[in-house]
Amino acid sequence: MARVKFALLLLCSTIAPSLLGSEIAAARQEPAPSVVPLDVEFGKAPAPVEASGRDHLLYEMRLTNYSGRTIILTEIDVFDSNGGRPLGAFAAKDLATMIATPGQQKEGADRLQIGPGSFVMVYFDTAVPKGTGAGLRLGHHIHVASASSGPPDPSRTILETPPLTVSGEAPLAVNAPLGPGHWLAANALSNDSDHRRTIAVVDGQARIAQRYAIDFVKVDAHGRAFTGDPSRNESWSGYGEPVLAVADAVVERILDGLPDNQPLAPPAIKIGLDTIAGNHIVLRLPGGKRVLYGHLKPGSIRVKEGERVRMGEVLAALGNSGQSDAPHLHIHVADAASPLGADGLPFAFRTFRLEGYAPSLDILDNPGGWTGPATSGVATRHRELPTDLAVIAF
């Protein structure tokens, strides 16, 4: 018995070195595994939403530092995992504008530093040619500063993330939520609006309900949001305008009875999870998606919970209640009825006219308005979402 065992060991010792050598040779043809001590976690997978003739892919990346030293980000490259086609290269200057550390106020280059045991959120708006976003597999190369003075070792300075697959689901197409006129799409589709960056933790889940939200402010032909005394709601162009159902739906949730705020002044009530959207309506659409209308005029809501409404039906009037400093309509689509305890979902308007772009939100403080919406070159858009500061007409 001992002789057989000994012979078997000799046989193994003869074959093993040959196999081991081929494995090492094969391994040397592949990049060394990255040992950059960052854990990568993506939020909700993006779905393409068309805006300004491009497919926009909005998503978040969480980077957690598992080492005992500070890690400095220097660049993140985005590419198509199927073939390596580059989709975006964000060097330190641009990257600093895409990063936030929840709970901390950091500025400039300090945002690129991830302390021991800390994490950052990286916000992406990767734009690709129209009609090419669905099904993309997004790869990322994360570059970090080298701790050594010699040539950087790629395995210690570059981390390639697992692919992130873009959803093939088309955004929800809805009708106009407002009537005729010029509407400024404030805090609309962009990578750095307040809506985009607001993370709320509700029931132990950190989510971005307002990822695609828009605040619609009415302006006149001269770009004025108000005429007369701006401290009166009635001076604002949009105050009291009818708010319309964007689709056939069921009224799931209503809050009414909160007072309007005085424009350009702090809220009249304490703001919390239930009151942040002011008087509001949530519609539940077939398939379970919800549409939230916020900051409605008190006492103007015409529908009841459980009621079925038809597309184009008047639901309420535009107001200035809740977390609002001037009359406007907040609208977003999400997967739950909570104003903040939900994940924001992409949507698009079936049709609207793009009339121009406001220079900034400062026009809302200017009694003289601005040059106003374009009088020529107006473009009709179909199944798109307006980008931030666009002036549109439904």
Image (cartoon, rainbow, N blue to C red):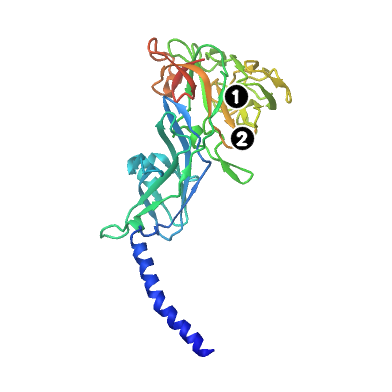
SS at circle 2: loop
| Corner quadrant of residue 76 | top left
Q: Is residue 336 above or below residue 216?
A: below
For badge 2, the amino acid type reads Asp
Query: For the view shown, which residue lies furthest in the left direction?
Result: 150
Tell me the residue at 39%/9% (across/down): 375
Q: Which quadrant does the N terminus fall into?
A: bottom right
Residue 363, percent from left and from top: 42, 19
Residue 265, percent from left and from top: 54, 25
Drawn side of residue 158 relative to residue 280, left or right? left
Q: Residues within 10 Å of mark 1 (few under 14, many from 20)?
A: many
Residue of label 1: 295
For badge 1, the amino acid type reads His
SS at circle 1: strand
Q: Which mark is residue 335?
A: 2
Drawn side of residue 283 relative to residue 156, left or right? right
In-front residue for pair 368/4 = 4
Tell me the residue at 53%/20% (across/down): 350
